[in-house]
Image (cartoon, rainbow, N blue to C red):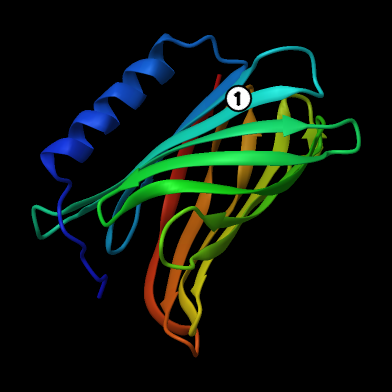
Amino acid sequence: MMVHHKCLTRKEELLAGILLLFLASSKCYAQSFEVMPGTQRIFIDAQYLALFNNSPGFSLFSRARATTEYDEQTTDLFIGAYLNYTTKSGFGGTVLGRISSFNSGVDVGGHYFKANDRFMIYALPSINLGSELLYSWFSILRFTPKLKGDWKLYTSLELFSAFVQTGHTSSVQRIRVGVDKRGYQFGLAVNFASRGKQFELTDTNSGVFLRKQF
């Protein structure tokens, strides 16, 4: 069973609304929208990538994510904006502002980013700028080789792990395997979640996904 967190406060809802308004009004280089109905809950994810100048350079990667239970009026929300500066080597620095159903804050870290028509990798170790030591690892890996005609293979692996001074607190793995035709992607999906120092598996949500890349 999924562990529920407290609902967003009025202040956090206001900050989330301001961030969403900013993202909607910005000129995006790429964006996507995914819906995943699973065995336990529905997962929705919207992602945006805005480039401020020619690559390499400054970019803004942002996402709004929601998970809704079938049997309860409970929704977990996450909104994050990743301000990146990437060098020609693919390495660079990141400032992350995030708001979620259980906390909010600002993180800083270093990332690695590379992308072409066949693959994409983004990896970010970061540390929270707060009174309590909190550091995390976030990465997205995609492999999309051509198959035949307009069809491509679509595979994606997303990893997130958070740690404090005493060790591991939580991790998430999201796996997608399917096909792509002209920006429409669909196939099988599974989300895993684990908690505690022993990385104990606490939740599995499997199903199908439909994703549109603009």
Residue at position x 39%, y 17% from top?
22
Q: Is residue 142 visible?
A: no
Q: Is residue 111 above or below residue 47?
A: below
Residue 24 in view (yes/no): yes
At 77% across and 39% down in the image, what residue appears? 92
Q: Residue furthest right?
A: 89
- Give the farthest residue toward the front: 131
- Classify residue 40 as left or right of residue 25: left
- Residue that mark 1 sits on: 183
Query: Which one is in front, 184 or 98?
Result: 98
Amino acid bearing label 1: Gly
Residue 5: image x %, image y %? 21, 62
Location of residue 54 in the rendering, given as x and y in whole percent from the top left corner: 79, 13
Q: Is residue 145 above or below residue 55?
A: below
Q: Give percent across and percent down for residue 65.
A: 37, 42
Q: Secondary structure at mark 1?
A: loop
Q: Position of residue 141 (x, y in %)?
A: 69, 50
Quick one: quadrant of the C terminus? top right
Tell me which corner region of the image, top left, top right, bottom left or bottom right, holds residue 146: top right
